[in-house]
Image (spheres, coloured by chain):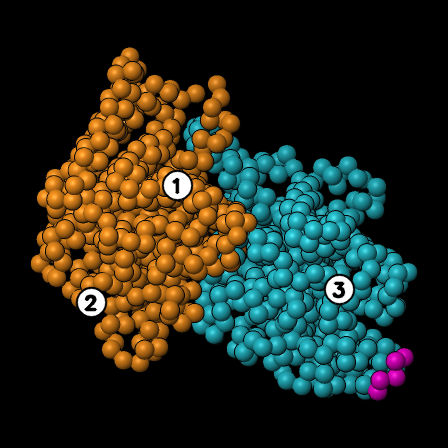
Chain colours: A orange, B cyan
Amino acid sequence: MPNPKTALRILGILLIIEGLFMWLTIPVSLIYGEGDAIHFFLSGSITIAVGFAAYLFTRKAQLEVTKRDGFVIVTTGWLAFSFFGTMPFLFTGSIPDFTNAFFETISGFTTTGASVLNNIEELSHGILFWRSLTQWLGGMGIIVLSLVVLPVLGIGGMQLFIAEVPGPTPDKLHPRIKETAKRLWSIYLIFTGTEILLLWLGPMNIFDAVCHALTTMATGGYSTKQASIAYWDSAYVHYVITLFMFLAGTNFTLSYFGFHLKFQKVWRNEEFRYYVGFIALFTLLIGLGLYHERGSDPESAFRDSLFQVVSIMTTTGYVTSDYLTWMPALTMMIFILMFFGGSAGSTGGGPKIMRIVILIKNSTQELKRLIHPNAIIPVRLNKNALSNEVVTNILAFLAFYAAIAVVSVVVMSLLGNDFETSFGAVAATLGNIGPGIGAVGPSSNFYEIADAGKWFLSFLMLVGRLELFTVIVLFSPVFWKE
Amino acid sequence: MPNPKTALRILGILLIIEGLFMWLTIPVSLIYGEGDAIHFFLSGSITIAVGFAAYLFTRKAQLEVTKRDGFVIVTTGWLAFSFFGTMPFLFTGSIPDFTNAFFETISGFTTTGASVLNNIEELSHGILFWRSLTQWLGGMGIIVLSLVVLPVLGIGGMQLFIAEVPGPTPDKLHPRIKETAKRLWSIYLIFTGTEILLLWLGPMNIFDAVCHALTTMATGGYSTKQASIAYWDSAYVHYVITLFMFLAGTNFTLSYFGFHLKFQKVWRNEEFRYYVGFIALFTLLIGLGLYHERGSDPESAFRDSLFQVVSIMTTTGYVTSDYLTWMPALTMMIFILMFFGGSAGSTGGGPKIMRIVILIKNSTQELKRLIHPNAIIPVRLNKNALSNEVVTNILAFLAFYAAIAVVSVVVMSLLGNDFETSFGAVAATLGNIGPGIGAVGPSSNFYEIADAGKWFLSFLMLVGRLELFTVIVLFSPVFWKE
């Protein structure tokens, strides 16, 4: 049995933090004089008050977090953030309906970027800033979750990274989280700051630069424009954002090494090399296809291809070119890229490059095992032989991913969506990407999906973002026993 | 290095057998007086002559078959049968074009049932009989392959069945194949004979009864009518065929036990129980959907649902109701069923129930492992704990299946097919089902697919039928070394 008081106490602290971030929106509102500062003040105050109450109420709780508490805190934490995070949307009337507001908020905190908004450019600066902030906060959470918490919880091969993370050895969760989080967050901050600066130097104003930097680094993909990045017809903007999407989709531990000029260590990392390799391969294939289709301007074909490949693979979801208007084979490749995901230890969602690599390696090893049935032929990553257990872990994760996708596609089609939309909506939310295919492609959004579908997809975003098991395990009777 | 002479010698024997079966078509042609007996005589004679030549030419070859020879013989065997099997189609002019003839023939021998014919009812009895016979022969091959050869070769968890198969202990491949094959083939023969009788007792004439029995037991799905089983508006025909599709999709070892009245042993088999369970579940879901949609006649809704679920799950591919006209969610369920497949050790294709079950079990065990990380929590099948190795084997198989499907879908869309058709054509051929979705649904066929697509899909049928690894391993450089 997990300890509800411990969980509640930590949730309280987290809510206070969320409330403080809501208050950050007040100056933005005041600067632009849009008169909705009071709503942000109110939202923040309620959130802080609730958080503080929870904190006081659980004064006597022990702060020794067990594994089971960990699962509970992570899932309820993301849910609580999404629940309280709806207030700014509701109070300002930007999204008057709770279902839509919740969808938009959880899509933010899970760094998905699937939107229900058809009037983005009419929204106040405060709301747009809050919307970007949800993703940036979600990204901060994910970095800690994937590099510090999940390895300890032993989720789907994440333990592979324990040794890799710079920081004190993992005895207890608490001091380790603190130290490692600080290091990784400073990189997150530096990247965000640099991107703001670079975008501001280009055709973007400071507000758009800030908002887009926040959502790029989170691989979130919320934009301040209905047309997403296509709004800026500027190669400079496209390449800058591509670069930072790429960095956001890279393991933050590697960036840490990069900052310490240990480039050899970065390049020796196999996941990183596959990450670069996949991007190069798909950019080439799709770029050639686009050039063939358009018949002119190879640079823009290359740029659109690179941008869209990086955007989908890192699960950001920005758009410079509507891939549904491309020829079927190119759209199909983009759809398939939705099942790759960013690097493990990045803010990217999806199954993750590392798992895809191990899947591929295990399959090729299986062929060798067939020919030499008595030899022990392990899967190697970064030259280390992986234990059979970790490989099974990872394969089980991918199987779960596929199974959830399949069941979800049936659910979405039961809710009246067509074949492509069902596939697209599931791939885009479970993979925390944003835009999908069919009726939820890059030129449209999730507004038309029925309410039941929105709740279901919200659940998928949560499940996908928290590496499946973290959420699913809560539904297992064993978890609540003893 | 495999031994080419040994392979050639066995291929020679197999071709002689194929030629003799071609000659079987001569009496059919003579009875119906359609004047194409000469073409069947010629086709058979050429095949026998080539087989005999290969046999003589390799007189000095040793008949000790190594594992590697096994892989080569299986793949080239199916290819050789398909190559020579085109002759009746070509010589009679029923299918004048080699690409189409090869597609139709390999679709037969792999028991797929994907067709390019738009004029089935205009074909001679001899040709229709040969077309059915290719499937029945393919089914005979598959039984031996999946229950005797593949377990020895160690393909994707097939070794699980070694202990189960009644027959002498596996010392050498040869005597074991002979004895076990005899037992299993007698069941195959008995089932075929019984189905002929039962269908003949109903509204079918003897010719249609024979052809359909041949293609049911092979889970092939070729029909003598363009409308498939929907041609017979008879509940009796539908239920009889459903029963035999079910039996053909059951592990033949279990049928062997059934014949010896060891029903307990049948019901204790977990794969069998899941097989029944999945059929019950999907029949119920789809049946309710059809009843809801049609608003009347619950029996026909149930019957259509049961028939279509069993037909797709066993990978037979007969049709009584065009599932593309059903509401999207029901079509989606049928599409998903295409990734289940029959039982291991049946004539059914696809990934197989056994593997799906182990996938599900391993995933639920993974949840338990998360909560109790130090406990050893194995996957159990029929109450035996499976080794980690076998589980990895099976997961690698499924991963391979998915990877091949994904790449193939891209290839099909590169060849100009739309999203649904690409998915449908790949699922239907790789899973050896027959009809897919999109432009290759049950009311249409593969005629319109471009030639390159037909060759590619032919390859998929072969790969799917031979449990992937058997074919893929031939492309591995390691295989040809030393």
| Image coordinates for residue B475, horizontal then vertical, percent | 49, 67
Q: Chain of mark 1?
A: A
Which residue is under mark 2? A233
Helix, strand or loop at disc 2? Answer: loop
Helix, strand or loop at disc 1? Answer: helix
Residue at (73, 61) in percent of width and height? B320
Which residue type does callout 1 highlight?
A: Thr
Which residue is under mark 3? B230
* 3D distance between C-alphas at marks 2 and 1: 34 Å
Residue at (48, 18) in percent of width and height? A482
Which residue type does callout 2 highlight?
A: Asp
Which residue type does callout 3 highlight?
A: Ala
Dominant secondary structure, magenta:
loop
Residue at (44, 31) in percent of width and height? A474
Local packing at callout 2 (Cα closer than 10 Å; few below 14, some 14-19, many 20+) is few
Query: Which callout, 3 or 1, points to the residue nearer the camera?
Result: 1
Query: Which callout, 2 or 1, points to the residue nearer the camera?
Result: 1
| Image coordinates for residue B439, horizontal then vertical, percent | 57, 70
Instruction: Say whether mark 2 and mark 3 are on the same chain.
Output: no
Which residue is under mark 1? A99
* Residue B27 in view in this figure: yes
| B310 in relation to A12, above or below | below
* 3D distance between C-alphas at marks 3 and 2: 57 Å
